[in-house]
Amino acid sequence: MPSLETAVWALVVSALAQIITILGWFVTNLFAQRREAAARREAAAQRFLEQQIEALYGPLAGLVKQSEVIYREVALRRLPSRGGRLDQGAFSDDDRQIWRFMLEREFIPRGAEIAKLLYTKPHLLESSTLPASFEAFLVHQAMQDSLYNLWKEQGVESLMVQGSGWPTAFNADIETGLTRLREAHASYLRRLRL
């Protein structure tokens, strides 16, 4: 028959084994919860990147590229220009009609779409503040709309009031932002494949 001392040691060893098992379960569970929380954060960050790309930066890049192509490949080739800019002072009456048509059908609607994206989706910007070129675009768009309406409704030539013009850094800032977001997204996808 086992001695009392042996029985006590057996109980102590059994209790220790149970305590170690319970502690092991808690530690394993804690690490599993942390891994799951990290995975949820990673998935949320990836979804946010995708939303930034498909709902803001991608559409902005497409609209800007369309405007750029129409301006460079149509307006500058068809209308009087100098140094890569339209020379409105050299416009004939036909040129003014062409430019007005292009404003009405191409630039103003496309600019309004760009402005709507910037006004309605600021939460998707890369930074917490609106980049200076984005602000400059919004000023340009407001002035272009106003000057166009003066021209259309009151016959006041926009040559009498100088607008701010398309911001030079706007296209590059959008393209740079889109590139960074795509790279970050690709990095998330690579990590998922590991």
Image: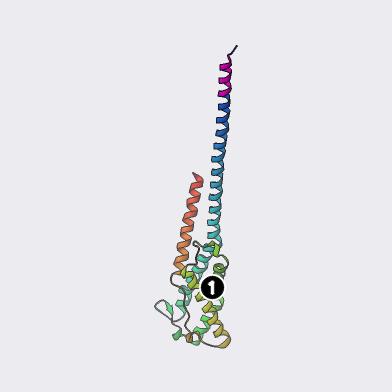
Looking at the image, is 165 positioned above or below residue 32?
below
Q: Residue furthest front?
A: 4
Residue 102 can be seen, yes or no: no
Looking at the image, is 19 positioned above or below residue 98?
above
Looking at the image, is 168 positioned above or below residue 45?
below
Residue drawn at (48%, 65%) of the image: 174
The verdict on residue 78 being magenta is no
Q: Which residues are magenta?
A: 3-12
Nearest the eye: 101 or 162: 162
Nearest the eye: 100 or 2: 2
Nearest the eye: 94 or 53: 53
Residue 25 image offset from top left, x and y in percent: 57, 34
Q: In the drawing, does residue 164 fall left or right of residue 109?
A: left
Residue drawn at (56%, 62%) of the image: 55
Other residues around mark 1 within 10 Å, as few (<14) / some (14–19) / many (≥20): many
The residue carrying mark 1 is 111
Looking at the magenta stretch, what is its main secondary structure?
helix
Amino acid at the residue labelled 1: Gly
